[in-house]
Image (spheres, rainbow, N blue to C red):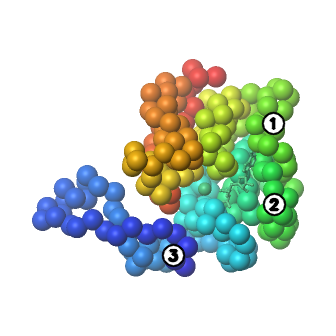
């Protein structure tokens, strides 16, 4: 299962075992990642089927990992989220995770531009019995997010997941910060971008956009943040009360 996800080699473990444990995030070998999944993953059959179908679709590497999906479900439940946003649906794995974690009257506004990929998503939303919770907007996400603001939906959302084109992350973040309520959460994917953000010789547009987004977030007083070394890097952004 783990072959689809990038696994780094472990750091050499120095003599002082405890200092290594406290100062570094553990590096996942393939065997350890398999252990993590076999010890903690509670993936419903419908999500497993979607993951398997997506393996045969172009750019399947774009799909979030199942442990990340389960983590996002926990966040949605912790927030008791009823109104969620997603920017970047692809074949619908992350949106299905979120929809399954919300109560029956929960709503997810999902943004994407690709009809073919989201047709797969719709099929699985139906199969999982959550299609009624998801409102898919097939249009550039900035357009959809602006429409939500024009419709007066400031501070209406509990949770937003940003996982579309990296060059627009800064724009998506500013929109989501307006749309998410104080105390709500914005989760941004791929913030470690395969490690390239830490290599200043890599300056392609996507890497530069993510690096610049990460930098601007560090001193953003409107939010509290935590950058997690899960999957390809996941940044949690909590909107402070005075940021409205
Ligand atoms: N979250 C998804 C999952 O778990 O499977 C993966 C999303 S994939 C990384 C990025 C998606 O963003 C693609 O489906 C792509 O069509 C979409 N996308 C790219 N540019 C976009 C735009 N301007 N507006 C909305 N969606 C866009
Ligand atoms: Ca992603």
Residue at 48% of width from left, 68% of height from top? Answer: 6
**CB of mark 2 near ligand 1 (< 8 Å):** yes
Q: Tell me whether the residue at label 2 lies in contact with that at label 1, contact meaning CB atoms closer than 8 angstroms.
A: no
Judging depth in this view, the residue of 136 and 232 nearest the camera is 232
Dots 3, 2 in contact, CB < 8 A: no
Q: For marks 1 and 3, give the CA distance.
A: 36 Å
Residue 54: percent from left, percent from top: 71, 72
**Quarter-of-image position of residue 42:** bottom right
Image quarter (top left, top right, bottom left or bottom right) of the C terminus: top right
Residue 207 can be seen, yes or no:
yes
- Residue 135 in sight in this render: no
Judge from the rendering whether residue 25 lies leftward or rightward of residue 19; answer left or right. right
Sooner in the amino-acid sequence: mark 1 or mark 3: 3
> Residue 126 placed where, x, y %?
85, 66
- Which residue is the site of mark 2? 118
At horizontal 14% and vertical 61% (from top left) the residue drawn is 16
Residue 129 pos. (x, y %) = 83, 65
Q: Residues within 10 Å of mark 2 (few under 14, many from 20)?
A: many
Disc 3: CA contacts within 10 A as few (<14), some (14-19) or many (>=20)? some
Label 2 sits on a secondary structure element that is helix
Q: Which mark is residue 2?
A: 3
Q: Position of residue 70 (x, y in %)?
A: 58, 62
- The residues bearing labels 3 and 2 have C-alpha atoms spaced at a distance of 25 Å
Q: Residue furthest top?
A: 242
On screen, 104 above or below 121?
above
What label sits on residue 143 in the rendered view?
A: 1
In which quadrant of the rendered view does residue 142 lie?
top right
Labels 3 and 2: the sequence-earlier one: 3
In the rendered view, would you say 37 is above or below 156? below
Q: Which of the two residues, 159 or 177, is positioned nearer the viewer here? A: 177
Separation (CA) of disc 2 from disc 1: 18 Å
């Amino acid at each position: 299962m783990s072959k689809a996800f990038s696994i780094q080699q472990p750091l050499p473990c120095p003599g002082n075992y405890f200092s290594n444990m406290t100062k570094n995030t553990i590096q996942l070998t393939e065997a350890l990642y398999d252990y993590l999944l076999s010890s903690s993953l509670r993936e419903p059959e419908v999500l497993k089927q979607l993951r398997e179908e997506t393996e045969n679709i172009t750019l399947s590497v774009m799909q979030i990992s199942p442990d990340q999906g389960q983590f996002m479900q926990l966040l949605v439940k912790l927030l008791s989220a009823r109104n969620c946003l997603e920017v970047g649906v692809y074949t619908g794995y992350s949106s299905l995770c979120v929809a399954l974690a919300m109560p029956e009257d929960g709503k997810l506004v999902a943004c994407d531009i690709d009809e073919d990929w989201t047709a797969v998503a719709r099929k699985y939303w139906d199969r999982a019995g959550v299609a009624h919770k998801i409102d898919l907007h097939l249009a550039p996400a900035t357009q959809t997010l602006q429409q939500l603001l024009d419709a007066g939906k400031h501070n209406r959302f509990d949770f937003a997941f940003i996982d579309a084109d990296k060059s627009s992350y800064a724009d998506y973040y500013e929109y989501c910060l307006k749309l998410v309520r104080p105390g709500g959460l914005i989760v941004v994917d791929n913030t470690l971008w395969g490690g390239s953000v830490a290599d200043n010789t890599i300056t392609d547009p996507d890497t530069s956009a993510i690096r610049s987004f990460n930098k601007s977030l560090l001193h953003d007083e409107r939010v509290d943040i935590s950058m997690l070394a899960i999957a390809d890097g996941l940044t949690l952004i909590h909107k402070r009360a005075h940021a409205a």
